[in-house]
Amino acid sequence: MLMLRVRGHTFAWEPARRRALVMGIVNVTPDSFADGGRFLEPDLAVARARELAAEGADLLDLGAESTRPCARPVSAAEEQDRLLPVLERLLKEPPCPVSVDTSKPEVAEAALAMGAHMVNDVTGLAAGPALAEACARYGAALCLVHMRGTPDTMQLDPRYEDLLGEVRARLAAAVAAAEAAGVPPDAICVDPGIGFGKAVAHNLTLLKRLDALAPLGKPILVGPSRKSFIGALLGLPPAERLEGTLAACVVAAAAGAHILRVHDVAAVRRAVRVAEAIRDAPDG
Ligand code: HH2
C-alpha cells in the first residue's frame, strides 16, 4: 500500500481502489493567476483555508509567492511576512495537515519551525538539499515538482525529446536527492508540474499518462486547477475554468493521481467521487 507520512498524519492508498485526496489552494499573494489579491489579507486567507477544509479538503497548500509565468520573484522576507501570520493562526487549530508552497529553504525552515506539515517545492530542490534537510529534521513531508527553467523562462517554447521519460528521470533524481538529505521514502510525493515548462500538448499527455510516474513508487500529486491549458482549449479566463478543471481532475484521478491540488475543493471532490464509484462498480 502506498503511503504518505505528513508529520503525525498518515495517508494511505489501496492500489485497487485508490481514492484521490484533495488539496485546497490558498494563495496569500497579490498576483496569483487565479485568486491573486483575494486572500492577501490574513483574516481572509485564514477564513478561506477553513472554508476549503469544511468543503472536505484533506490537505491545504498555503503559498505566498506566485509561480505563474513571469511572476515577480519575492524576497524570503516578503514571502515570510505574507505567509507566517496566516500559518500561525491556522496551526493553532489546524483543520487538516497544512503544506507550504515554497522553494526557499529559509521560508520552509520558518514554516516548519511553526509546525507546517509538508513543504511543496515547485522547483524540485533546485536550490540544493537544504529544503529537504529541513523537512527531514522536522519529520515533515515533501512534494517534489518537475519544473523546466524558472517562472521567467519556463513557457518560452518548451520542447522535449521524450516528455514522460525526461519528467520521470528528473523526478527520480529529485527523489534520490531528498532521500539522501534524510527525508524518509514514505514522506515524499511527486508532481509532473502541469504548466511548469510545458506546452498545452505536454500538459495533456502528462495528465493522460500519469501512470508513467508509477515506477517512482511515490504518491502522485497533480495541479491542473484553472490552468492556462484549460484556457487555451476553451478560450476562457481563470474564473471560468471550473468545468475544465473537473474534467482534468477526473481524468487525472483515473490515470493514477493520489492528490489533486485545486482551488474548487467541493466541486472536485464531488466529481471525483462519482468517477471513482463508477470505476469501482461491478462489471455486470
Ligand atoms: N501549481 C501552482 C503552484 N504550486 N504546486 C504543485 N505541487 N503543483 C502545481 O501544479 C502547482 C503548485 C500554480 O498555481 P497557483 O498556486 O494557483 O498559482 P500561482 O503560482 O500564480 O500562485
Image (spheres, grey):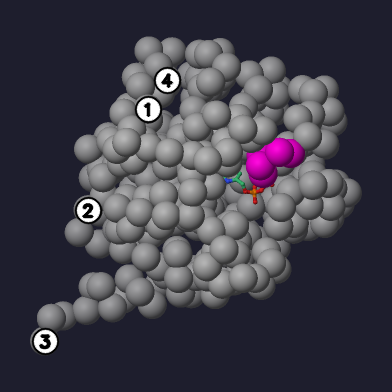
| Residue 94 coordinates in the image, percent (x, y) | 65, 46
Query: What kind of element bears circle 2?
Result: loop
Three-letter residue code for mark 4 = Ala
What are the residue bounds of the magenta stretch?
A: 67-71
Q: Which residue is mark 4?
A: 178
N-term-proximal mark, 1 vs 3: 1
Classify residue 19 as left or right of residue 53: left
Q: Dot 1 surroundings within 10 Å: few (below 14), some, or many (20 or more)?
A: some
Total numbered badges shown on the rendered structure: 4
Three-letter residue code for mark 1 = Arg
Task: Answer whether residue 54 is magenta in the image.
Answer: no
**Magenta stretch: dominant secondary structure:** loop
The image quarter containing residue 118 is: top right
User: Does residue 189 appear anywhere in the picture?
Assistant: yes
The image quarter containing residue 5 is: top left
Q: Which residue is mark 3?
A: 284
Q: Is residue 127 above or below residue 123?
A: above
Q: Is residue 137 above or below residue 281?
A: above
Q: Is residue 63 above or below residue 252?
A: above
User: Does residue 4 appear anywhere in the picture?
Assistant: no
Per the model, the C-alpha gap separating discs 1 and 2 is 24 Å
1 and 3 marks in contact (CB < 8 Å): no
N-term-proximal mark, 1 vs 2: 2
Q: Dot 3 surroundings within 10 Å: few (below 14), some, or many (20 or more)?
A: few
Task: Answer whether residue 70 is magenta in the image.
Answer: yes
